[in-house]
Image: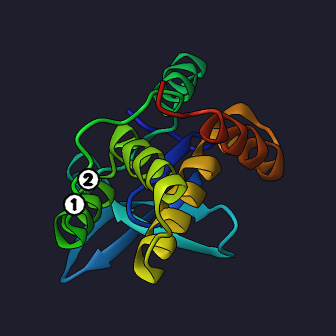
């Protein structure tokens, strides 16, 4: 169970820290809400305690998870569709899942594709969104500066090439 002070990923908002638990009255019933301060966004969200599991909110990555993500990012992707519409739909669906491995797939695949052919405007935006979310979570989890994490991830992605 989540508690005050926990670092969490909040799809689609980003990452944050549970700042407190508030009780609010809604329609003559009292409900408990987790107040989550979002990192880098100067805002908080309230999530009903009863819907935490279905909301996709989860603890941030562990160090072991991060090493697995770094390893995954260094792999050459397979079966990237040549059709823009297919890639776009798949990537949107992957980002929406809130699953960090799916987010890493978008980052890796679009980075690799950009080496072969310039990305469209929307794919560049999608890459930036996924890249930033991934790096924010890694930075929060490790307690590192976001700029350092972005440099590290870029270095990994730059090293990926067809054998």
- For disc 1, the marked residue is 93
Residue 58's x, y, as percent? 39, 41
- For disc 2, the marked residue is 97
- Helix, strand or loop at disc 2? helix
Residue under the point 72% across and 48% down: 150
- Helix, strand or loop at disc 1? helix
Q: Quadrant of the N terminus?
A: top left
Residue under the point 50% across and 75% down: 125
The residue nearer to you, when weighing 154 against 136, is 154
Residue under the point 44% across and 43% down: 104
Quarter of the image for residue 140 reads: top right
The residue nearer to you, when weighing 148 against 23, is 148
Look at the picture and state if 9 lies above or below 39: above
The residue nearer to you, when weighing 9 against 106, is 106
Residue 148's x, y, as percent? 82, 44
The reply to whether the C-beta atoms of the residues labelled 1 and 2 are less than 8 Å apart is yes
């Amino acid at each position: 169970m989540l508690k005050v002070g926990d670092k969490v990923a909040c799809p689609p908002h980003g990452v944050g820290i549970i700042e407190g638990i508030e009780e609010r009255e809604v329609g003559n019933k009292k409900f408990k809400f987790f107040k989550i301060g979002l990192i880098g966004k100067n805002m908080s969200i309230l999530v009903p305690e009863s819907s935490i599991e279905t909301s996709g909110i989860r603890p941030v990555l562990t160090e072991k998870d991060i090493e697995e993500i770094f390893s995954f990012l260094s792999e050459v992707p397979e079966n990237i569709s040549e059709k823009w519409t297919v890639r776009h739909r798949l990537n949107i669906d992957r980002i929406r899942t809130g699953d960090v491995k799916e987010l890493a797939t978008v980052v890796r695949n679009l980075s690799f594709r950009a080496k072969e052919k310039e990305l469209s405007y929307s794919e560049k935006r999608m890459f930036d969104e996924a890249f930033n979310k991934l790096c924010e979570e890694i930075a929060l989890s490790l307690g590192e500066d976001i700029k350092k994490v972005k440099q590290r991830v870029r270095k990994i992605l730059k090293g990926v090439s067809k054998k």
